[in-house]
Image (cartoon, coloured by chain):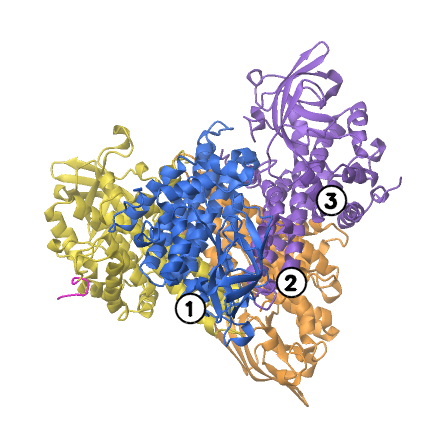
Chain colours: A blue, B purple, C yellow, D orange
Amino acid sequence: MATAAQQLPGEQSTEQRIRDVKEATRGVTEQYPREYLLKCIAEGRFPEDCWRALGEFGLLGLSIPEEHGGSGGGVLEMTALMEGLAEAGIPMLFLIVTGLARVPIVKHGTLDQIQRFVQPTVSGEKKLCFAITEPNAGTNSFAMTTLATRDAEGYVLSGQKVFISGADEADWILVVARTTKVSDVEHRSEGMSLFVVDAKDPNIRMQALNIQAEAPEKQFLVFFDEVRVPAENLVGEEGRGLAGMFDSLNAERLLVAAMSLGTGDYALKKAVDYANTRAPFGKPIGSYQALQHRMALAKAELEAARLMTYSAAASFDRGESAGGQANMAKLLASRAGTQAVEAALQTHGGYAFDRDYDVVTLWPLVRLMEIAPINNEMLLNYVGQHVLGLPKSY
Amino acid sequence: MATAAQQLPGEQSTEQRIRDVKEATRGVTEQYPREYLLKCIAEGRFPEDCWRALGEFGLLGLSIPEEHGGSGGGVLEMTALMEGLAEAGIPMLFLIVTGLARVPIVKHGTLDQIQRFVQPTVSGEKKLCFAITEPNAGTNSFAMTTLATRDAEGYVLSGQKVFISGADEADWILVVARTTKVSDVEHRSEGMSLFVVDAKDPNIRMQALNIQAEAPEKQFLVFFDEVRVPAENLVGEEGRGLAGMFDSLNAERLLVAAMSLGTGDYALKKAVDYANTRAPFGKPIGSYQALQHRMALAKAELEAARLMTYSAAASFDRGESAGGQANMAKLLASRAGTQAVEAALQTHGGYAFDRDYDVVTLWPLVRLMEIAPINNEMLLNYVGQHVLGLPKSY
Amino acid sequence: MATAAQQLPGEQSTEQRIRDVKEATRGVTEQYPREYLLKCIAEGRFPEDCWRALGEFGLLGLSIPEEHGGSGGGVLEMTALMEGLAEAGIPMLFLIVTGLARVPIVKHGTLDQIQRFVQPTVSGEKKLCFAITEPNAGTNSFAMTTLATRDAEGYVLSGQKVFISGADEADWILVVARTTKVSDVEHRSEGMSLFVVDAKDPNIRMQALNIQAEAPEKQFLVFFDEVRVPAENLVGEEGRGLAGMFDSLNAERLLVAAMSLGTGDYALKKAVDYANTRAPFGKPIGSYQALQHRMALAKAELEAARLMTYSAAASFDRGESAGGQANMAKLLASRAGTQAVEAALQTHGGYAFDRDYDVVTLWPLVRLMEIAPINNEMLLNYVGQHVLGLPKSY
Amino acid sequence: MATAAQQLPGEQSTEQRIRDVKEATRGVTEQYPREYLLKCIAEGRFPEDCWRALGEFGLLGLSIPEEHGGSGGGVLEMTALMEGLAEAGIPMLFLIVTGLARVPIVKHGTLDQIQRFVQPTVSGEKKLCFAITEPNAGTNSFAMTTLATRDAEGYVLSGQKVFISGADEADWILVVARTTKVSDVEHRSEGMSLFVVDAKDPNIRMQALNIQAEAPEKQFLVFFDEVRVPAENLVGEEGRGLAGMFDSLNAERLLVAAMSLGTGDYALKKAVDYANTRAPFGKPIGSYQALQHRMALAKAELEAARLMTYSAAASFDRGESAGGQANMAKLLASRAGTQAVEAALQTHGGYAFDRDYDVVTLWPLVRLMEIAPINNEMLLNYVGQHVLGLPKSY
């Protein structure tokens, strides 16, 4: 089936590429509006229909080369898709997970791995999630202890991972694990490898976290108890997993940024509509600068963060080192998104906390993005050290 | 039964009076800790046992003169009680409602009214709530349209009120209503009166709002459809209701401020405990200035807002005009409380949004206090106009 | 003489064009470093040598078409020049004035006007400044009253203008004046015209303002007392002056943004150097997050504002409506620039206010850019009304 | 001569004591208004007449017991005096220096020392300044190296001190110096002593710093080159100097806070006056919330910081440990003062930077108070560690 996204010609300006993806996205979001997502959240179920529609429109194939059944494009297109969904009030967390998990397989995996693990995600038929964070290590990935031990038949993997979004929906989990114990490597960044693990393995146990995110995707604490992983599921070279992973974490930053940007814009649209009609003292409250300027500043900051986000995405797709811009994009977008939602809250007065007005319901996910998947303090550390040249602070 | 609060001697320094009330409050909160409140919230029920215990300890009698069965003291003691509850993680919204509703009856009501409506609230046996805000009027009380028409037997009251906390629990509602239509008064602030209305009247209909506040008290849209109110339930002079009310709104400000302060401190305590033990990079994250200074600044702002709050309460109790300080206290305390909870969120990293950690659950109520019962923008308007002498801005 | 800037080829990516201009700019700033500017400020003289060098390097010819003796390029190149100067600690206010004043002449003027008034500014031989703001009208340009009355020989111009930068150095002043009194036009935006006025006319009196800007350019209150202006000095159509002008005010916004960005970066560089060496407690103070994160956040905001600035400049040069982006660029860049200088101040401790350390000396100009040439509140009004669609607030 | 301050009765409420001192202060500031101070600054001379008037009114005797020729009262009265001066636009830096230097002599000195060094400062006839900070040690007082070596005739003192306000005006300098080298003490806080040194000693050399503070007092780098100090000028016990000093640093915090508070109020008064009359769009700009709310928030924060300041002062005077409150007072007051001046700057538009409007001239001193005499980061460290119980961060 020919889809809007598949028809994107190869040579286009960045702006045009973004516009094309967003237009294609509207084809899905008009069918699956905010109300649909709210219903999924209320019923505690994954928005499967919408996900499949994204597949049918070729949008899940973005960033996957056409030779692997994808729709082409790069992280820039995935970013535009994420932003388009969020702007419509459908910020699909699972898209971030998917985007992140596929990058290293496409980049470092074998053709067989791409065909088995990535290709079926293009239609939405199969799902892939991602596990790196551990309860004790937190943001310090080097401190992970999940261990995959080699034996004749492959690997045996044991450990715990936390904050694993959509683990219950996933068919496979891309797991970062040590293949050499931390005590046996020279530097703690060494000795880690990437594995695609069958999410339905009986030796995997999942415990749902009670996360308040107003999103249909649940998050899990996942226990791996001597899970057998075939050798052919090792992605890239043994022991070089983190290097391969770190690069794709920049892609994750950009998808998170896009989610914040879109949600911020969605919130501002609601706030502007309300502020243009609500008038307890005779004139619309949107004419009060205390509200108007708060919204306007949030808008300006969203727009600037948006330029940073797509600039970083374009760099990433050109294969350049995008770390500085990607980190700044996530930092600024998550702050601006939260500020936009905060402006919407204040604009709605007492109704802001009436869930039926669907404003307070925007806050948890957008605020969480200042913390997850990595907290903004670590991004400031990155900018301080690697952009400005200051000493390490932690 | 002799209670701690009843034993408070008449002559004490402000600080000592606060300490005494807080100590007495601990007698209740040790019995009904945060877990108890969370259970009530989860089960959707009013924390009746805790409320009765407050009555038994004489704490619900604070601010009510001993000759009316109260424990004496003033708004300062009520404020200390509210802060003490919130510091222990038990911010009882209904205490604000109670405190607010009783002030005008004690001040402007007849002895009979005090005995009928106020005295039974001292033990917690009966409950009193308060209704002023209307859906269309919002913060503009002058625009209210709820009307009480006089006839031979008393008054007939019709209209709608919104954001009425605890209306389902209340036995009586103190209602502000017009007794002269706005078209027949010279200035819109005139022609309003106060009535005590039977909350169980069949002509009253209540519709629960879907408010996200993480509090056991629900909020309601209340419809009054030709509710008969006996003439002896008119509090104070007919047509002078707002003047009598406005003064007690300052008391409400201070109880709200106290709730924010206590909640802020509760959040900081949790954050400090977590920051002193969590150490993904080897040393406790509390030693990182990005977190430590954010907590420390919130603490300093809480302490300053606390001084403002009790200074205003003491002024109020001395019968002085406390408007400026009360408004600044609510403004600053609600901001500082939110900042404290925000600091606690950021400190907890990904666990901040895990409801089991009970951090994200602190946010809705504390953030709502920047909006309700009156938004901080209106308080800034007050300070701008009445403290600084600038022109009206709205 | 062939100059670096003149050699810029026509077809280049935006980034490359910026890099080329900055490299050419370094040719001048290496010769005329910060110390040179400080000396000019101390001696109260215009940095004439540096200005002439900019001319010799072809940099003053940027944005002027080659057929008029310029170096080509557009506002984007001028913006890069301004930023390059500011990054080196040489924020030349007069470049903003020049850039702004030339735009409407090149765009709406006759060939003769371009040759007489614009061409001689390319070498730096002649100077052009700009006068729009009036003491009573302030930011409300529509309220201006300076009047040019037509007679047989041309125009007679009378009125007052304020905050005229570099008026004492200029050969000509581009003046916005009414040619029809406000009482005779339908809408107050009509009836204004642009004139090139001889700055040395005896009927012009200039009064230096005591502006604290730490810049060599002075600002003036300028009195026009029946100044004769030849008819051929009218730029564009009579009565259509403001329309022609408003467009070029966007160019001014971008030059101001560039000055803020460059100054912010200059300040951060100084701060980083200091923070990497100063170590009263044993380790460099740059490793304290209170300082590092403040610098890092300022850096991130500078980078985002920079993308907005050049994005707006490219739009402007393509002839698109750049108002939204230009206003957001100035808003964000001026805020970020100030934050960077504030971070530098705090980093330098007590030495921050020692003028010999040249940190406090960066503050006035950068902070002024949040106010001048238009205050950020008006920009927020613009974003509120024209980007978000909210009602007018003033 | 009986003065207003001398007549203050011993038993008064805090508020009344503050009011009395402020009223007495107005007797001086009406005679020596802001214009007088600006003139002193312009002419580079100490405001000697005003200082002597403070002496004549008994105000320099505040905090000095009547038995030593003082006017009684405590740090609370000195704080009120400082605030009163700053509110009138006369923030006398030298009062802080004086207040700080006298505290340890009165508290730990001999009667002879009090009579020689403190008593003559009550009339203003003699002046005392204070020297603790060293160029390399900065905020880390423990790292000081200035050494006083004991010999038969007394001490010989050598070293450097920096940021010594008013050193050129002083008759004596209270110097903190090591009497035991840092290499010979167990803990670096030990081995320091306090000396009163003759400021006119030929072995003292002073180098004026080029500090931008818009204050008549100059600051100096002071070189002590084998200065002989008689043994009877040692204040308190040898080696116990820092302990004695640290306490009085809290008094300094409060005087600095008071200067910030008064200057903030002075700035707001100017801003309100301007905002009530300036009206480029027809109505006073004070009716725009962007300006009004910024001023109102600054006002609220000033008021809260003021309560903290006097609460700390009262604690200090009662001999309680006032460290927490004093540090929070300086932190909050310096921030609020700066915010007030920033609000005044933005309100004045382009005229903000016209020195003749005397707004930009308020900024350096008030902003400096966020850095000096100790930077706010160190105060946040104090609150974090000693109030909240977090680990040391530096």
Query: Dot 1 surroundings within 10 Å: few (below 14), some, or many (20 or more)?
Result: few
**Could you tell me if residue C221 is visible in this image?**
no
Give the labeled residue for mark 3: B36
Q: Chain of mark 3?
A: B
Which mark, residue C373?
none
Please name the predominant secondary structure of the magenta segment in the image.
Answer: loop
Judge if badges 3 and 1 mark residues of a common chain.
no
A280 relative to B283, above or below: above
Which mark, residue B276?
2
Q: Is residue D358 magenta?
A: no
Give SS at disc 1.
Answer: loop
Residue B391, position as x, y percentages in the image: 50, 36
Q: As rendered, which of D278 and A43 lies closer to the eye? A: A43
Callout 3 touching callout 1 (CB < 8 Å): no
Residue B173, position as x, y percentages in the image: 70, 26
Query: Dot 2 surroundings within 10 Å: few (below 14), some, or many (20 or more)?
Result: some
Give the labeled residue for mark 1: A237
B140 relative to B352, above or below: above
Query: Which circle, 3 or 2, is nearer the viewer?
Result: 3
Amino acid type at mark 2: Asn
Query: Which circle, 1 or 2, is nearer the viewer?
Result: 1
Q: Residue at the spot x=68%, y=44% of the render?
A: B258
Which quadrant of the structure image shows residue D188? bottom right
Q: CA distance from mark 1 to mark 2?
A: 39 Å
Q: As rendered, which of D168 and B36 lies closer to the eye? A: B36
Q: Chain of mark 2?
A: B
Which residue of the protein is positioned furthest toward the bottom in this rendering? D152
Point out the stretch of residues depicted in magenta: C1-7
Q: CA distance from mark 3 to mark 2?
A: 26 Å
